[in-house]
Amino acid sequence: MTPLDGTIVLDAAAMRAAEQAAIAAGESVESLMQRAGRAVGDAVHRLAGAHAVLVVCGPGNNGGDGYLAAARLRALGRTVRVAAAAAPRGAAAIAAREAWGGAVEPLAAAKPAPVLVDSLYGTGLRRPLAADEAASLARLVAGAALAIAVDLPSGVASDDGALLGQVPRYHVTLALGAAKPAHLLQPAAARCGGVRVLPLGIALSGDTRALPPPRLAAPPVDSHKFSRGMVALIKGRMAGAGELAARAAMRAGAGYVSLLGATIPQAPHALVRRSIERDDPLVDARIGALVIGPGLGRDDHARDLLERALASDRALLIDGDALHLVTPERLRARGGTIVLTPHAGEFHALFGETQGSKLAAACTAAERAGAVVVYKGPDTVIAAPGGRALLAGEASSWLSTAGSGDVLAGAIAARLAAGGDPLDAAAAGVWLHAAAARRLGAGFIADDLAEALAPALAAAIRETRA
Ligand SMILES: NC(=O)C1=CN([C@@H]2O[C@H](COP(=O)(O)OP(=O)(O)OC[C@H]3O[C@@H](n4cnc5c(N)ncnc54)[C@H](OP(=O)(O)O)[C@@H]3O)[C@@H](O)[C@H]2O)[C@@H](O)CC1
Ligand SMILES: Nc1ncnc2c1ncn2[C@@H]1O[C@H](COP(=O)(O)OP(=O)(O)O)[C@@H](O)[C@H]1O
Ligand SMILES: [K+]
């Protein structure tokens, strides 16, 4: 059982293509299903302790996996029952039902067991469950102490994470072969519980992954403040936003942080405050990342500052209000390294209404703007031009607090200023932001979050070394 971090994410068509390629190379649907069923049976055996198991099976291959998992559990000496609402349809699923060979209870009449395994529908679900079937599933999940979904909770749409009806909450979801977008996109992801991937030994390829832990190291022995990365942030009308982003950039490892447009000395004194009117601080070639947008405002002065930022040749992070003052075409024409960090409102203001999943929307947006797009929310998606994308999955819901986006902008800017691939920088910032929130638990405010980036960074460096 593999955790999701960094693993490949495939939509239903790509999963089917991988399966077809394996079949063309000598596998059969039956052999794949046998592997899947055995892996599910073994995983349930490990998770379920000594408790009795009920496996509910659907008519397709997801159901086939369930019959074979039940057979495996029986072979392992477990008490296991099977229930189904309909007979299996495909040849492989029919063979799986025969391999089980035991009783199959009608779903509507099945009594709950301490462990419920949902093998009704997986990636093939295209319409809502029938009302009586959905009601039976909800009743059996509610009556179980441990609810495990095979591949996906029945009732979620694999590719976009939508719910096609009422979907119960599971404790664990066993993703077969690879993670699917629904394991990481809301609202489906919140129904999955802990997701573990059961590898099926088939070759996988694709451009989308679950967010990996960042590979970070302490500054090398000969480092100096500028080699660690210089972040410059343009202060806006709401001064606090820039202050938060600046603190975050310092705590996320930048060697030098300056706040442009803030001239009154105040704590933290390590933050260099400079006028933006005198000289031109934006042409400083040492700037590794220039941030504009947090608390910027949307007036003429804001527009003027944004023009100056766009005219610089530095790597640019555009957040908040600035996302309302620009177009994707303008960004593409500017070129260079650009990272955009919109929440849903800012995303729609910049890119208009979009079709398809949040993942598809982020990928299209990245292509249009020629920029890395960090589409924030409870299921942050990071996409780069060219098709690479990362799904961050669930983070602390306590992040829904004013200023946490400013902190994210600062954290990403620090990693961007350190150099390397902007997608990796955005990914590291999102990871550190979520890790800082995890460390803080409940009731934190954005100021706490900025400070907690330092221990989150230390932990990421330790984990990279380990
Ligand atoms: N990828 C891999 O490597 C491997 C994948 N494997 C497994 O295959 C699963 C995908 O299997 P799948 O394509 O057969 O789809 P599945 O989810 O079982 O459902 C389709 C069936 O349900 C029916 N149906 C659909 N909606 C319905 C509804 N609301 N109410 C009633 N019926 C409904 C639909 O009927 P139809 O729409 O055609 O009328 C069809 O009969 C995947 O999740 C994984 O578990 C492993 O076995 C091996 C390795
Ligand atoms: N319910 C939630 N669960 C997880 N993360 C969330 C949630 N709500 C917001 N966030 C995260 O918190 C940050 C909020 O950013 P943003 O909306 O720009 O806030 P602000 O403008 O107040 O700084 C983003 O990183 C977002 O992904
Ligand atoms: K299922």
Image: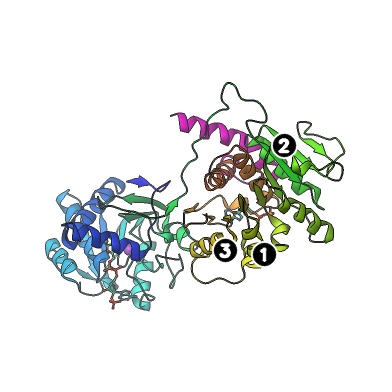
Q: Earlier in the sequence, mark 2 or mark 3?
A: 2
Question: Whole-percent x and y of residue 342?
Answer: 63, 58
Label 3: few (<14), some (14–19) or many (≥20) C-alpha neighbours in 10 Å: some
| Residue 394 visible | yes
Instruction: State the residue at coordinates (66%, 67%).
Output: 349
Question: Could you say which disc has been placed on residue 368 in the image?
Answer: 3
Report the magenta stretch's main SS.
helix
Instruction: Single out the mark in the foreground, 2 or 1.
Output: 1
Instruction: State the residue at coordinates (19%, 72%).
Output: 90
Asked if the stretch drawn in magenta spans residue 464, the answer is yes
Which residue type carries mark 2?
Val
Nearest the eye: 315 or 262: 315
Say which residue label 1 marks: 327
Q: Judge from the rendering whether residue 171 lies leftward or rightward of residue 378; answer left or right.
A: left
Which residue type carries mark 1?
Thr
Label 1: few (<14), some (14–19) or many (≥20) C-alpha neighbours in 10 Å: some
Question: Could you say which disc has been placed on residue 257 in the image?
Answer: 2
Q: Judge from the rendering whether residue 424 lies leftward or rightward of residue 73; answer left or right.
A: right
Nearest the eye: 367 or 10: 367
Label 2: few (<14), some (14–19) or many (≥20) C-alpha neighbours in 10 Å: many
Label 2: element kind: strand
